[in-house]
Amino acid sequence: MKTLTIQGPKPKDVSIARIGVYCFLILCSLFFLMPLYIMIITSLKDMEEIRQGNLFYLPKNLSTYAWPKAWGTACTGFVCEGLKPGLLNSFKITIPSVIVSVSLAAINGYALSFWRFKGAYFFFGLCIFGAFIPYQVMIYPLLRIENILGIYSSIPGIVLVHTIFGMPILTLIFRNYYSNLPIDLFKAARIDGGNFIKIFFYVILPMSTPIMIVAVILQITGIWNDFLLGLVFAGRENQPMTVQLNNIVQVDFGVAEYNVDMAATILTSLVPLLVYFFSGRLFVKGIAAGALKG
Amino acid sequence: MPISNSVEVKNLFFKYGTFKGAVNILSEMNLSIHKGEFMVLLGPSGCGKTTLLNCIAGLLDLDKGQIWIEGKNVTWKEPKDRNIGMVFQNYALYPSMTVVKNISFGLKMTGASKTLIEKKVKEVSELLQINDLLHRKPSQLSGGQRQRVAIGRALVRGAKVFLFDEPLSNLDAKLRAELRYEIKKLHRDLDNTMIYVTHDQIEAMTLADRIAVMKNGIIQQLDNPKTIYNKPNNLFVAGFIGSPGMNFFGGKLDRKNNALNIGNTKIKLDPYDYVSKPQQDLEVIFGIRPEDITLNSNSSISIEAKVELIEPMGADTLIWTSLESKPLAIRTEGSSELKLHDTLNIGLDIARSSIFDKKSEERL
Amino acid sequence: MNLSRLLFRNLAAKIALLPMIVISLTVFVGCVIYSIIFSFTNSKLVPVFDFIGWFQYTRLFKSRKWDVAVENIFIFGFIFTIGCLILGFLLAVFIDQKVRNESLFRTIFLYPYAMSFIVTGLVWKWVMNPTFGLEHAVQMWGWESFVFDWLVNRDLAIYAVCISAVWQGSGFVMVLMLAGLRGIDEDIWKAIAIDGIPKWRAYFSVIIPMIRPVIVTSVVLIASGVVKVYDLILALTGGGPGYATTTPAMYVMEHFFNRANVAQSFAAATIMFISVIVILAPWAYWEFYFRQRKEQN
């Protein structure tokens, strides 16, 4: 009987299904990578080649003209200092905003998980509801409020706005994370004599590293990439990179220099892309955790 | 091939991992399971029992060897072509489908006609008494009902061999006992070959026709429950089976006098049935079960001891004492009149004891 | 329970949550009410309380621009949601097939999400540039009659927006779907193998029903993003050609800053707000109702 000889692992058949899976994934990868590829090669071409040449072809003569121009001399409106000021502004906006919004959300999540009181959940629900309201409904009144407070068109102004709009989702993911911590830890700390603040700093905060990282990554990318809020609330001297970028590209007068435009887009994306590449797995976890457990 | 073997595992090797980091889960595994037999694979976590089951099912690809089911070489066959059914720890019923759909889904995939499917579903649901559950969803069923539906799903495709992957592990003690009884009844009624994986030795003892006790991918002993209990092959099997466990003592075997020296205590071994009598004096481990020890022995073999702890267990009582400064547990029926520090004259039933070579841990 | 006990019990937590409470009330409730109230006025440059009833709304609904904006948000919303759901789901399913280099693929599909909407808009604007972009490239390859001028075509521009949006958003949905797929008990897959169910059929009849909550969450999150979309369109088309790709969000912003007609903006913003409520309310109710039921069990 021939079957007597069949033994050992089944021969791996390279089935059509398997090939199909890889084909699909590779085709999709091409679709997703194409714009990045074009960004890079266009920034390395000179305008002559861009005009005559093919969008997809590699540069025949490598030209780094676009890069210093995008960085230091491109015109963003009346000023021609490139993206450089925008970089500093983006940092000035992002760093305090991340710190304030994440800290506040952590305390909120902590208070909601361990120290419930009547009505807390009502306001929490209200807060979550706020995450879905379109910005446009709240921008103008917010502007007026900040004007009254004297912080409109300033760094504190934009930091406040980012904190407000970031609070719902961040509080949600902190709360979900904390509610999955063992409550016995908290009870033991209370018996040991801890109060609200002590327990937070000595017990909860040391255990918060994973979710802190996730929240920080989400906020860094979200705030750095923001355009509208920075445009409205940061003030003319503090415009973030995204706004500068838009100004460079959308010139109404003069000649459009596409290589400079593309170099500028890459520069603007560098920080969030780097953050993403170095912490990709955590980024993924953060999105899933925030959205799924909610 | 003798057709009386329902399932045969031949020379099976299974590795986990690749190259240098690979771990041999199963090596040279050979096992024959008879038609209609209830075979239990018993062992601690990591012993390879679940891996073996998954290889038999075709869910895992083995590295070397063959699997034969009902006289056919199924080594390269897909699980669905092996004519098997499987019941999982969490039953794995399709949550969004009703009981009827759950049972008939597999059959529908084979292209069977609607009338045939209806007929088979009716047969199976009558046999398992799940007629009035047919239109419920799994979330609306109790543990026992889910188990029956899981079995029905396998039955309806005419599976000849049933595989069970620790189906009772997640349940509380009472439900476990109930469902254990149902599985045993099912085996009696259906008479299919059943291969059952568990780490619970009580399940193994009550359900099995034969038990394969496994450790580190190797079958330590393959026997019926009675033999495994009374004549364990090695130290591991002896310690794994039985609750409360066997008492163990280190000692020296005096071959000339056929006696055992445990410290200052000397025990005559005349009633002991050797597998192979050793040629010289040896360091051994002596094992005796708590129920094979008598409290007030009137025979010549009698050891003096004092009661140190009493554990009333309801139907019996466990008396703790010590022999040569090591704890010794004695089981006695009913409740005991003994008090702490009472003196005992304990007798050991040598014929029912076990002696193991200390180095090889094998039974002597 | 007297008032002081009510107030001082758990005081620290109440103080800690004060910012959240204040913000929720002032901004999420207060500002919305503010906008609604002033939509009933005739304010131009600054909000003035000169009440004129439904005037702004009638003007809104007569506006051709608003019609286009609403039509666009429906087209965009539908295509964007369905596109992201299907592409995200397929990407998740295929990645989950024990492919090698899974994390490489995941990185490739998700990196667009780490980029700003402005960047996405500008890059796709360049790619779809009729003179120098895709159209020109394909024509150079020999297909001389190839045309891809969607960006300057009034009827097709909105679809160009959809493509770039799906490119950016599918990765996010993929991550959600993947998490959902990975949450499925491995034993279910074993049962499927033993039952002999073909894989595609299994996804259809067993798996998709099992990840229904994830799908619902994805739809809600995608939908909440649809109404907010602004940066992307501003960068890609500026709302054009003409106002062919304008949206309610752009309409609102325009009337705030460029056209100095704040009351009209408030009216448009109020309509946006109401439509979000209308979509969200049934979902929120269903979520909480079901969660109550689940917790009772």
Image: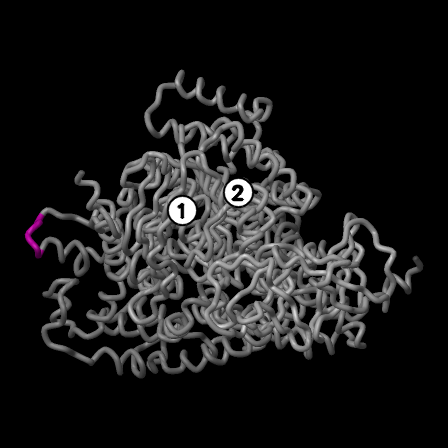
| Residue A213, x across and y down, in percent | 52, 72
Residue at 75% over, 73% down: A189
Residue identified by numbered label 2: B208
Q: Which mark is residue B304?
A: none
Question: Taking A222 as reference, is A32 left or right?
Answer: left
- What secondary structure predominates along the stretch shown in magenta? loop
Mark 1 residue element? helix
What amino acid type should be assigned to the residue bearing mark 2? Ala
The N terminus of chain B appears in which quarter of the rendering?
top left
For residue A125, what is the image quadrant? bottom right
Give neighbour class at mark 1: few <14, some 14-19, many 20+ (Cα, 10 Å): many
Q: Nearer the viewer, residue C19 or B220?
A: B220
Magenta span of residues: C140-144
Q: Nearer the viewer, residue B191 or B83?
A: B191
Q: Which mark is residue C85?
A: 1
What amino acid type should be assigned to the residue bearing mark 1? Leu
